[in-house]
Image (cartoon, rainbow, N blue to C red):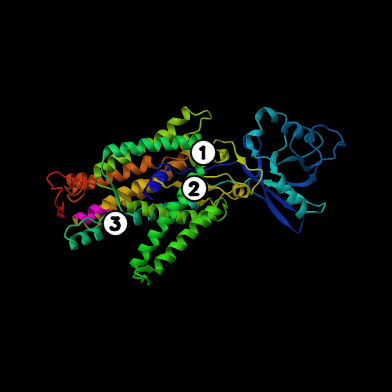
Amino acid sequence: MRSELWIILAVILLSYETEGQEAVLHVSDGNIQKDYCLVYNSSWFNVSTSLSDAVLYSLVNMTSSVLCNDSGLKPGSLKGAAVVVIDGSCNLSQKAQVAQEFGAEAIIITSVDAMRSSSISKSEHSNLTIPLALMRSQDFIDVLKVFSGNDTKVQMYAPPIPEFDFSILIMLVLAVFTVAMGGFWSGAAEREKLNARALSAGEDDSGGELSLYSPLKILLFVVLMCGMLLLMYFFYRYLVYVIIVIFCLASATGLYSCLKALLNAMGCSKLSVQCGERSCSVRNLMVAAVSITLAVVWGVYRNEDRWIWILQDLLGVAFCLNFMKTITLSNYKICVILLSLLLLYDVFFVFITPFFTPNGESIMVQVAMGPDAAGEKGSGDVVVPGDPSSSYEKIPVVMRIPRFAAWAQNLCMMQFSILGFGDIIIPGLLVAYCHRFDVWTGSSKIYYISCTVAYCLGMILTFVVMFLSKMGQPALLYLVPFTLITSGVLAWRRQEFKQFWAGTAYQVLDSTREPLLPGGDAEHPVTVRKC
């Protein structure tokens, strides 16, 4: 399972906010009213920002015609109407020009294919004075079923999207909670290990943990991460399923570990039963069944955006907690090397790679959002799937919270604020080390609390910069300096930097059991001492 944890970490991603050019088509007949998704180019056409100010049009169904010429039309026959025609046979501007000449006030073009705002270009609309929008064919079929009368009216409007969305606060709380609990769990496990070591006369009890201690291995690991990200970029459509399977396995394992630890902390009995010479814990079997079931449910319904994000976030939190408890950094030197290299990794693949990719898109964002999510990358080209029931595969190593204020966008497709697991796990490993150091030195959680607060402030700065720049940010750019500098300065002020840098004497390097600090005897247990 450790190898699965590393593969998941190798595709850690960043938070990214989306913007769109979606509008609402409000349809009513006096008794029934319903809203539908529209896509338009806000650079060339303006629509009202509220329903109360939107112009009321009579709906004219001309989907039996492509409207590429004036065949079958009488002068003024479309006066004051919003005309609906099908896509194809000629470009959009030609259809709109014909509709405008016959008095139409707006034109809506239905499409069975993905709808692109960039398909409405400036050169094509130079002679147009009426708004032009795109609509899913499936949605218009629904309009015809719901509104069968001749007195159907429509209004087009695009509600402004607030700069701030409440989902950001939820994301902040979720991230800080996960980091704080992961660090706390790691420190608590370290305390239990020390107590067990003392009772067993110095015998090692790693509890299944994996300690990182070698700078060379850290460097090799980061190089492998770069290679994994490049493979995901070039072979996304195949490797995404590998990541999905690994996430199901790793998240089920993480949820099992979290639930078992929670039940142990609550003092719940294991309800063991005897099976021959072996005992079986009914409680653990039930926990395993729940964990596996939730992971399988997520795997089956992973593209049901309306509700599956709740389960993905739950599994994601469990995965991150288990990772921070299982993977430990042996000293502050390793923390500095790992976090610094991953900071460079994050910045390079976000800000530098756009200069080398054919579409000018960063490799990190391309992998984070998926190659079919062009409309979600903030490039100005909004792409809405022609079939709302279909969805593209996305790698599941992100926390996702729906953007509650984006009503018009959510009609077209669910919009999310996302935060990569890496922006939680990587600083969380440092927070976990700080709590373990508190345990080693008996310093009343001062390192743990300070580093957690620094993480929170770093996240807040990330969101502030994101709002000011109106683009996604590599969160590690702010989280790494905040957490590293805070913990390092605290150790220096407490005159414990030498011990904080090197770790503790009982930490070991590898299977040879050589102590981390010089002067120890690899063949004999090293007693725990305060730094």
Q: Which residues are magenta?
A: 435-440
| Magenta stretch, overall SS | helix
Mark before the other along the chain sequence, 1 or 3: 3
> Dot 2, how many residues are within 10 Å of its Cα: few (below 14), some (14-19), or many (20+)?
many
Q: Which mark is residue 236?
A: 1
Mark 1 closeness class: few <14, some 14–19, many ≥20 residues within 10 Å: many
Which comes before the other along the chain, label 3 or label 2?
A: 3
Above-or-below relation of 20 to 177: above
Labels 3 and 2 touching (C-beta < 8 A): no
Q: CA distance from mark 3 to mark 2?
A: 27 Å
Residue at position x 56%, y 52% in the image: 305
> For the residue labelled by badge 3, is the local secondary structure a helix, a strand or a loop?
loop
Q: Is residue 211 above or below residue 375?
A: below
Q: Amino acid at mark 3?
A: Gly
3D distance between C-alphas at marks 1 and 3: 36 Å
Point out the frontmost of discs 1 and 3.
3
Q: Residues within 10 Å of mark 3 (few under 14, many from 20)?
A: few
Q: Is residue 398 visible?
A: no
- For disc 2, the marked residue is 244
Q: Residue at x 45, y 55 (%)?
A: 315
Residue under circle 3?
Answer: 207
The local secondary structure at tag 2 comes to helix
Side of 530 where 53 appears, left or right: right
Q: Earlier in the sequence, mark 1 or mark 2?
A: 1
From the top left corner, tell me how far across and down residue 320 is, in percent.
39, 52
Q: Quadrant for residue 423, please give it.
A: top left
Tell me residue 352's x, y (percent): 43, 30
Q: CA distance from mark 1 to mark 2?
A: 12 Å
